Amino acid sequence: MRKIMWRINLIMAKINGKLKRLGWIHVLKILLNLPIVKPVNFSMTAMDANAGIGLYKSGDLPDLWIPLQNDPGCDIDQYLFKYDLYHSTYIGDLVSGGDTVIDCGGYIGLFTLWCLRKGAKKVIVFEPEKKNCICLKRNLSPYVESGKVVLVEKGVWSNYGTMDLSLTESGVGHSLLNGIEAVGSASVEVVEIDSVVQSNDRINFIKMDIEGAERQALIGAKRVIDKDKPKMFICTYHLPDDPRAITDIVKKMRPDYRFEHTGLAFNERGFIQEQGVVVF
């Protein structure tokens, strides 16, 4: 029954317009359990044991430093450049040449690199986790050195301070909120976007995938949002009422925004739920 229900939910989500950026071909592949993206085989070519990271090689991606884990492919498959459902399908037309982008939740720098390949002029990246920051700096070293990538090694919040970051076994899923299956924690600095962005910077696009901290991050970006009205993609599947709460926060700042709830995620019961909201 569960297998039947999530398929029905998927079809209804597509019919009701919640998967506008997901084509029917992709929907059919999901229904038939066919692969949507090309599998990636990774092999480690070097390891920095002191930093807890490894250098992995594959055919489709550049060589990447990734936090050591049992199966790096599990977390990397979804970020494929040529076949990437998340970036190309949900965000593909939101980043243009010459844009200045804010990447909240930088991980190891793949979304930032994707934006640069789309022609972004500058990317400001927020990432609080130490291993991820080391990987990001190595993966994007030419861009960091040139100033095209500005790495802020802090979490994104509604004020400046220090918080506990709950850590997962892999490089993704670390959260400033309680409730995840954490294997440890680390004290990290958090900061508002408004306090980092220079007054002469015009922000064109903001991406937020920060494990439930999106609401607080939006509050901390009020000046930027009010001044520049950037396009945004905000993940809305971390907290049950995220779709409504996040939309309400943005509407209060800029009533002239439009919203497109879209995306695809599976919860623990196998049901389809919204991945995020496109704001434009």
Image (spheres, helix red, strand yellow):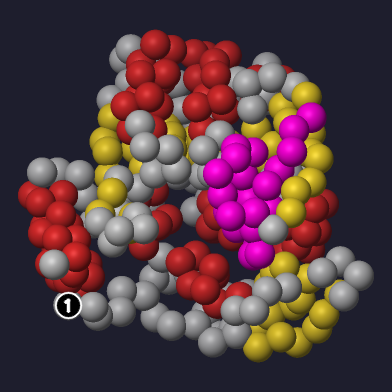
User: Is residue 272 something one can see in this rendering?
Assistant: yes
Q: Is residue 67 above or below residue 86?
A: below
Dot 1: what SS? loop
User: Is residue 93 something one can see in this rendering?
Assistant: no
Q: Position of residue 244 (x, y in %)?
A: 32, 27
Q: Residue at x 75, y 48 (%)?
A: 185
Q: Residue at x 68, y 80 (%)?
A: 56
Q: Main secondary structure of the magenta part?
A: loop
Q: Which residue is mark 1?
A: 32
Would you say residue 265 sits in the magenta stretch? no
Q: Amino acid at mark 1?
A: Leu
Q: Position of residue 90 (x, y in %)?
A: 34, 50
Q: Position of residue 237 (x, y in %)?
A: 39, 44
Position of 7 compared to 120: left or right? left
Q: Nearer the viewer, residue 122 or 41?
A: 41
Q: Position of residue 9 (x, y in %)?
A: 15, 55
Position of 104 compared to 91: left or right? right
Q: Residue at x 18, y 69 (%)?
A: 3
**Category of crowding for the residue at label 1, using alpha-carbon neighbours closer than 10 angstroms: few (below 14), some (14–19), many (at least 20):** few
Q: Is residue 61 above or below residue 118?
A: below
Position of 102 compared to 132: left or right? left
Q: Which residues are magenta?
A: 162-182
Quarter occupied by residue 199: top right
Quarter occupied by residue 28: bottom left
Indicate the quadrant containing the N terminus: top left, top right, bottom left or bottom right: bottom left
Q: Nearer the viewer, residue 71 or 2?
A: 2
Indicate the quadrant containing the C terminus: top left, top right, bottom left or bottom right: top left
Q: Residue at x 31, y 74 (%)?
A: 36
Q: Nearer the viewer, residue 58 or 129?
A: 129
Q: Nearer the viewer, residue 128 or 270?
A: 270
